[in-house]
Image (cartoon, grey):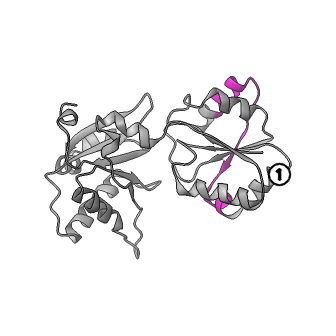
Amino acid sequence: MLYLIGLGLDKKDISFSSIEKIKKCKKIYLESYTISFPYPVKDLEKFLSTAAKKKIKLIISDRELMENNIKKIIREAKYEDIAILIYGDPLAATTHASIIEEAKQDKIKYELLHAPSIFTGIANTGLQLYKFGKTTSIPKWQDNFKPMSFFNIILENQAIKAHTLILSDIGLKLEDALRELAQAAIANDKDILGETIFICSKLGTRNEKITRTKISQLIKDKKLQAQIKEPFCFVYPGEMHFFELKE
């Protein structure tokens, strides 16, 4: 059996049902290439060992392992119980939905165990979830590749007065994300410096920090930037309901 297990946003978010599954697994993989964890992985391993009342050893799965050897991992589940632990919810990213498709093709049984994710955690901003549009992501630009398509999603959501959740690529520094956002706005002939944005750091954890500020203020406030730790995301609000404005 293959178990895709959501960890939630903090290391103690994992469900009791998930712990029960982990206890009987022969191998436990930790998907680590789509997120910068808001806590040390060793702390997670220690917590899981305590909760399961047995020694839990996590196999750290980077991009190479998950992309080049995922078929091997899935096929292991044909003969023994295998778990893949995923930050947030296992179906919050299309990357993990492809694992299910692979399991189906190989006729391998699987089970999903859900958990809190960024898509519910953003409600901590005081914004209403049903008013969010499409989600987008700011990629880490390369010297010869600087995609700005994420800004098109913002514009589409603004056109229907919807909020935009903007995720950040793993390893992308806050100052670089702000620079890319500003440059994409200029390329689209938009002046966004005076507009409001939410910046969320370590959402859903004890060290959560949510700041509502002007984009221009965030760009120039180095002290505030230093307080924002990975993982972080932005929320670019659309038209705000009076209830949201009171938050």
Residue 52 lies in the magenta-colored region = yes
Amino acid type indicated by mark 1: Lys
When asked about the image quadrant of residue 152, the answer is bottom left
- Residue 149 x, y percent position in the rendering: 35, 68
- The local secondary structure at tag 1 comes to loop
When asked about the image quadrant of residue 130, the answer is top left
**Residue nearer the viewer, 123 or 139:** 123
Residue 183 against residue 178 in the figure, above or below: below
Name the residue at 20% across, 67% down: 186
**Residue nearer the viewer, 129 or 95:** 129
Residue 195 against residue 191 in the figure, above or below: above
- Residue 110 x, y percent position in the rendering: 72, 47
- Residue 94 x, y percent position in the rendering: 54, 57
Give the extent of the magenta segment: 45-67
Residue 84 lies in the magenta-colored region = no
To which residue does mark 1 refer?
Answer: 78
